[in-house]
Amino acid sequence: MAGLTKQYTFDYEEYNSIDDLSAADAHLVLEARKATEIAYAPYSNFLVGAYAVLNSGEFIKGSNQENASYPVGVCAERALLASVGQLFPNEPIVSMAISYNNLNGESNRPLSPCGMCRQALQEYEGRVHQPIRLLLSGMEGKVYVISKSTNLLPFSFSGDDLK
Ligand code: THU
């Protein structure tokens, strides 16, 4: 007997530039782009910035922090999540903008968060029971808006699997 073919799909929004975003979203993206300036990425020259607004209305930023021992480096998204965990524990994140400045190439396509960060974003969503809306871009060009980070991680492993 043939197996059932199933589908995984999700909707996301595509904007041609930040000019088409609400003022609040454009602000988050601009600040994420600015946060690339505090990245420490002398090995990859790929500067990533993240900027989020919390339910409380507070803002928090993150950037990638590399290390001569490459695997020790941390991505901007996880640096930001670690800061939220310390400074505003259990405070839900409404939206997180993530941008990058690739000093070796172009920075005009939306960033695709790495798998490890998708897992970390999913954990935080589950921890506070609220989805994180993602605004993905480079330094210019299109912006993708994704309503929850778990859309980017189908068939994910979570704490529920450990029960
Ligand atoms: N990086 C991030 O900070 N976030 C991502 O989503 C993708 C990759 C960083 C890790 C490393 O410092 C550099 O970008 C190149 O991979």
Image (cartoon, grey):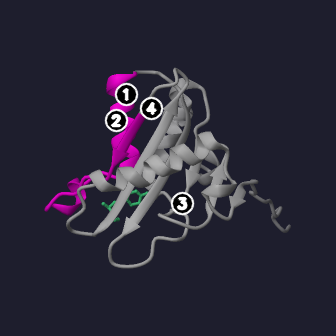
Question: From which residue to which does the magenta span run?
Answer: 60-88
Please tell me which of labels 2 and 4 falls first in the chain.
4
- Mark closer to the observer (2, 4): 4
Front position in the image: 92 or 27: 27
- Give the total of numbered labels: 4
* Residue, disc 1: 85
Please tell me which of labels 1 and 4 falls first in the chain.
4
Q: Position of residue 80 (x, y in %)?
A: 38, 40
Which amino acid type corresponds to the residue marked 1 in the rendered image?
Gly
- Lateral position of residue 156 relative to residue 120, left or right: right
Q: Which residue corresponds to the image point at 42% horizontal and 61% vertical from the top-left?
A: 100
Q: Which residue corresponds to the image point at 80% horizontal and 59% vertical from the top-left?
A: 6
User: Residue 61 appears in which quarter of the rendering?
Assistant: top left
Assign a secondary structure to mark 2.
helix
* Residue, disc 4: 59
- Mark closer to the observer (1, 4): 4
* Residue, disc 2: 82
Which amino acid type corresponds to the residue marked 3 in the rendered image?
Ser
- Mark closer to the observer (1, 3): 3
Q: Are marks 1 and 2 in contact (CB under 8 Å)?
A: yes
Which class describes the residues within 10 Å of circle 3: few (<14), some (14-19), or many (20+)?
many
Q: Is residue 67 a member of the stretch shown in magenta? A: yes
Q: Which residue corresponds to the image point at 40% horizontal and 35% vertical from the top-left?
A: 60
* Residue, disc 3: 137
Q: Are marks 1 and 3 in contact (CB under 8 Å)?
A: no
